[in-house]
Amino acid sequence: MPTTCPKRVPPLSLCSGTSVATACGPTGGCERVPISIGYDARAGLQGAGVGRYARALLQALLVAPGDEEYVVLAERGKSPSWLRGREHVRLASLPVSQRASDIAWQRLRIPVPVEWFTGPLRIYHSPDYLLPPLAHAAGIVTVHDLSFARVPQFAHPQLAAFLNRALPRSLRRAALVLADSACTAEDLVACFGVPAERVRTIYLGVEASFCPQPGEDEREHLAREYGLDGPYLLTVGTIEPRKNLVATVEGFKRARLQCTFDGVLAIAGAPGWLAEESLEAARRAGRHVRLLGRVPDADLPALYRQAEALVYASHYEGFGLPPLEAMACGTPVIVSNNSSLPEVVGGAGVYCETDAESIAGAIVRLLEDAQLRTKLVRTGLERARLFTWERTAEQVRQVYHEVV
């Protein structure tokens, strides 16, 4: 299947003239009735991009909740502490782990509706692909990417098989489907036959901590914690075949022979599935490649800011948060010219193909051209300002009202 999707579709612009629910008495007096929205916060406990999405979106939705009451679902004993005592929030819990509930709802198809645990809902939003059975709520599901269908050779076989069975059921249950990019929206139509009128493209945002202003002593902190005491290029993401780290490492090695750069390639990310080939390529490169492991969210802005550039030559992305975060920090980006990445980066990056020679050429071009780097810092900051979680939350809120 092709991995290149149209880049011309702009962010979704929804009408703002939506209504709120009202209850009217026999004398004609009406009052606003809160719209009860179930939100699955269990994904927010994850450390990868889906977890970042689930947390950041909920935080942005709660800044100005209006007439909504959010019934936030978590595992028992694992409710996010920052939600406790918040207005417009009611916490609900499942008596079992997320894995156990996935087995019950998605594999065994036990038809127990989520409202048994949350109480009555008007809307239920899953920010992580799969909807549970619903009694009366209108279902909203966010699909971040379809890499398991578009580039199955890079997917974990068991996960791909599971999603190929479970995702179609969730898509049929959903009143509307949210896609992180126009590329993913097109893939939903092409791969799973979702009617285009039931898909909404809503881009992600970038958090305020990703900014160009350096923190106090952050260079010293990076040297102490990660051994980064000189110039470095950075790549960020779970270590798995789709991220194309074998070619990225080889491209970096070739680039060092073609230019005067005497720094290292820093790889920030935890090992995922089928990671050994990527890890071995990094180890074979010796002292010029550093494996940082999973980096705490609090350290990511400094890592981006101090890097000479981000290299993100992925085979496929449903959105691609690292390039956006890097641009917001004033760091130039090199990205592969496929899937959703041109939607995010626009004209503010250097593009490459996914082979080592093309990656090397992009690195040399960026490192050897000071004027280009200056331009990309400026255009990258301008581009990143278009993506805010406030805007994302407002568009999601309008989708909620659309299905009420």
Image (cartoon, rainbow, N blue to C red):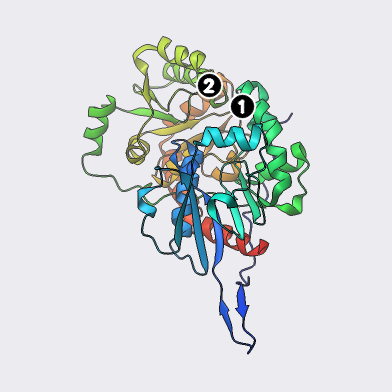
| Marks 2 and 1 in Cβ contact (< 8 Å) | yes
Q: CA distance from mark 2 to mark 1?
A: 10 Å
| Image quadrant occupied by the C terminus | bottom right
Q: Nearer the viewer, residue 90 or 387?
A: 90
Position in image of residue 380 (x %, y %): 47, 46
Q: Callout 1, which amino acid?
A: Leu
Mark 2 and mark 1 lie on one chain; the one further toward the N terminus is 1
* Residue at the (39%, 47%) spot, across then down: 80
Q: Is residue 31 left or right of residue 166?
A: left
Q: Quadrant of residue 77?
A: top left
* Residue at the (50%, 37%) spot, across then down: 96
Q: Nearer the viewer, residue 164 or 398?
A: 164
Q: Callout 2, which amino acid?
A: Trp
Which mark is drawn over residue 159? 1
- Residue 221, compared with residue 7, is above or below; it is above
Say which residue label 2 marks: 273
